[in-house]
Amino acid sequence: MSSPSKDLALIVTLSKADAGTFVGPVYRVISGTLIIKNLDFEHLRAGTAVGRCNPPGVARIYMSLQKETAQSEFDYYERKAGFDPALSDSYSFAADVKLTRVLDLRLARTRRQVGITLTEIRKEWDDPALVVPTRLQSIGSLIARGYGGFSAMIYPSAQRRGGHNIVIFRDQIASPDYVTPLSAKATKEWA
C-alpha cells in the first residue's frame, strides 16, 4: 500500500471529489465449464482477488456497462491465458444497478480531481513485479474502506475503445442502492 502521507492526501481528495449516479444494466462474461454453468451471481459478489481497481482482499464486483465491453474483457483475458476466445466456452451475467455515489473516471474533471490520467487507468496492472499498488488500486482500496462515500467507480476499458467498466465495492452498497442480477445463475445468452 502507499505511504500514510499519500493515503491522507488521497483521502482528502476523495472527500472532495464529484459523485455521480449510475442506473442501468451491467454485464460480465466468464470462462465456462460445467462447474461455471451452475455458478450463481453471488460468486461474483464474493470476489476479493487483486484487480485493476483494487489490491487483494477488497470485496468487489467487476462488470461492464456494455455487452460488447464485457465480451472484449473476456476475450483479452482468454488470449492472455493462451486460449482462443472464439473456441472458449463462456457464460454471462447481467444485473440491474442503481448506485447514487459513483466516482466517474470517464470524466476528465473527476480524473483531475483524484490525480489520475487515462494512460494510468489503461496501463497494464497485473505485472508480477508490481509491488506498489497502482494509483487506480489505491483509489479503489480507499473507496472500499468508505472514504468519499462512494459505492462504485466507473472507468474506461483498457480492452475496448469507447467501452467502460464499473467496479462495485460490495461493502459500500447501502439503501437506496442495489445490484440485482437479471438471472440468479450464469446464462449462455444475456438474461
Image (spheres, helix red, strand yellow):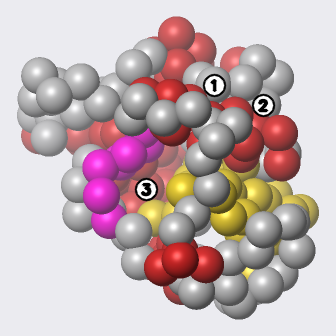
Q: Which residues are magenta?
A: 48-54
174 with respect to 147 (left or right): right
Residue 10 in sight: no
Q: Does residue 53 belong to the magenta stretch?
A: yes
- Direction front: furthest residue: 87
Q: Is residue 126 left or right of residue 110?
A: left
Q: Which residue is mark 3?
A: 143
Q: Secondary structure at mark 1?
A: loop
Whether the residues at callouts 1 and 3 have beta carbons within 8 Å, the answer is no
Amino acid of disc 2: Gly
Could you tell me the amino acid type at mark 1? Gln
Residue matched to label 2: 163
Q: Amino acid at mark 3?
A: Ile
Q: Position of residue 152 (x, y in %)?
A: 59, 57
Q: CA distance from mark 2 to mark 3?
A: 22 Å
58 or 127: nearer the eye? 127
